[in-house]
Amino acid sequence: RKEIHNWYVNDASAMAAAFTPDGKVLATAQSGKGFYFWEASTKRQLFFAPADPGQTPDLVFSLDGTRLFTCGNEKSIRVWSY
């Protein structure tokens, strides 16, 4: 019951987080900003995908890790290939 990692993003509040099924990538959803993808072993940012303004996003990976599902205030569910 102790913190072992801390991914700090200074430009937005984290609303959701999900690991790929293999545990190698962490995706975080930032309110009104977008999605950050991190290499879990090094905490290095891999890339950023912007979200629609005002979107409060949520996310989950498919069981095989090939798709990312996002949803938010825009009343839609988006499917991304990963």
Image: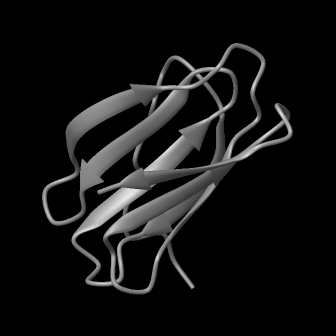
Image quadrant where residue 32 sits: top right
Image quadrant where residue 54 sits: top right
Residue 42 image position (x, y, % from top left): 13, 56
Side of 40 relative to 19 (left or right): left
Residue 74 image position (x, y, % from top left): 82, 31
Which residue occupies the foreground of this view, 39 or 76? Answer: 76
Residue at (23, 39) in percent of width and height = 45
Residue 25 image position (x, y, % from top left): 27, 63
Q: Quadrant of the N terminus?
A: bottom right
Image vertical order of residue 56 relative to residue 71, above or below: above
Residue at (85, 34) in percent of width and height = 73
Does residue 31 appear in the picture of this structure?
yes
Side of 19 relative to 42 (left or right): right
Q: Quadrant of the C terminus?
A: bottom left
Which residue occupies the foreground of this view, 46 or 6? Answer: 46
Residue at (61, 51) in percent of width and height = 70
Residue 11 image position (x, y, % from top left): 52, 17
